[in-house]
Image (spheres, grey):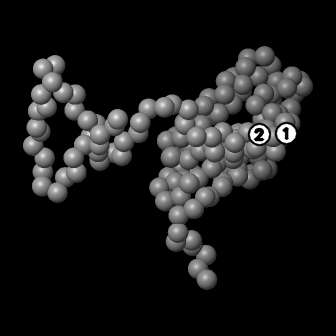
């Protein structure tokens, strides 16, 4: 059996959505693949966030180590640095959410310090709920019924051969 599924279906992606290089520039590395997947499937992106990644604590001097090179650097967790970190994390959240939406996927954010099962249940319930508006929805290829002139006579609009007449809504 092929590992590639040919029929459209539901796909769930669970990730922290942080690019390996730590870059915050768009487009994200994962956007093209997500866009291709969402073009064929119903995609839900479950983004896992740890609150410790959203704000830098005031802990004095930190020694940071680059995992690839092993280089170390000491950084003082001053108020301006913590504020810049908080703004960068907020910008990343905003850009990530916009990127997921632009790819055509549903987006659920769960936090490690909250009940993710309850968050997931609320999300699924909200997706299954029917639309609340009572407007009649027409198919994209069906134009709405033309409004008759004030004198009560109907104008006939020319239609290409084989075209369906407009849908009449009582």
Q: Which residue is mark 1?
A: 115
> Measured from the top left, where is residue 125 in percent x and y?
69, 42
Instruction: Give me the residue at 86% from left, 32% from top.
Output: 62
The answer to whether the residues at label 2 and label 1 have Cβ atoms under 8 Å apart is yes
In the figure, 47 relative to 81: above or below? Answer: below
> Measured from the top left, where is residue 59 in percent x and y?
90, 25
In the figure, 71 relative to 55: above or below? Answer: below
Q: Residue furthest right?
A: 59
Q: Residue furthest top?
A: 79
Q: Which residue is mark 2?
A: 119
Q: Nearer the viewer, residue 96 or 153?
A: 153
Q: CA distance from mark 2 to mark 1?
A: 7 Å
Instruction: Give me the residue at 63% from left, 34% from top.
Output: 92
Q: Does dot 2 land on a helix, a strand or a loop? A: helix
In the figure, 97 relative to 82: above or below? Answer: below
Q: Quick check: 135 left or right of 164?
A: right
Q: Nearer the viewer, residue 134 or 107?
A: 134
Instruction: Give me the residue at 56% from left, 43% from top.
Output: 100
Residue 22 appears in the picture as rendered: no
Quadrant housing residue 75 = top right
């Amino acid at each position: 059996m092929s590992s590639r599924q040919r029929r459209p279906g539901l796909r769930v992606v669970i990730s922290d959505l942080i690019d390996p290089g730590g870059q915050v520039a768009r487009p994200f590395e994962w956007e093209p693949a997500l866009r291709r997947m969402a073009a064929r499937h119903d995609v839900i992106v479950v983004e896992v966030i740890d609150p410790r990644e959203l704000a830098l604590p005031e802990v004095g001097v930190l020694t940071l180590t680059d995992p690839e090179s092993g280089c170390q650097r000491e950084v003082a967790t001053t108020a301006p640095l913590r504020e810049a970190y908080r703004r960068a994390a907020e910008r990343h959240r905003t850009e990530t959410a916009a990127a997921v939406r632009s790819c055509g996927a549903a987006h659920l954010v769960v936090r490690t310090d909250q009940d993710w099962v309850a968050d997931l249940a609320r999300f699924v319930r909200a997706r299954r709920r029917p639309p609340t508006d009572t407007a009649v929805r027409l198919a994209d290829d069906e134009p709405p019924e033309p409004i008759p002139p004030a004198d009560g006579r109907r104008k006939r609009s020319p239609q290409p051969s084989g075209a369906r007449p407009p849908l009449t809504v009582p």
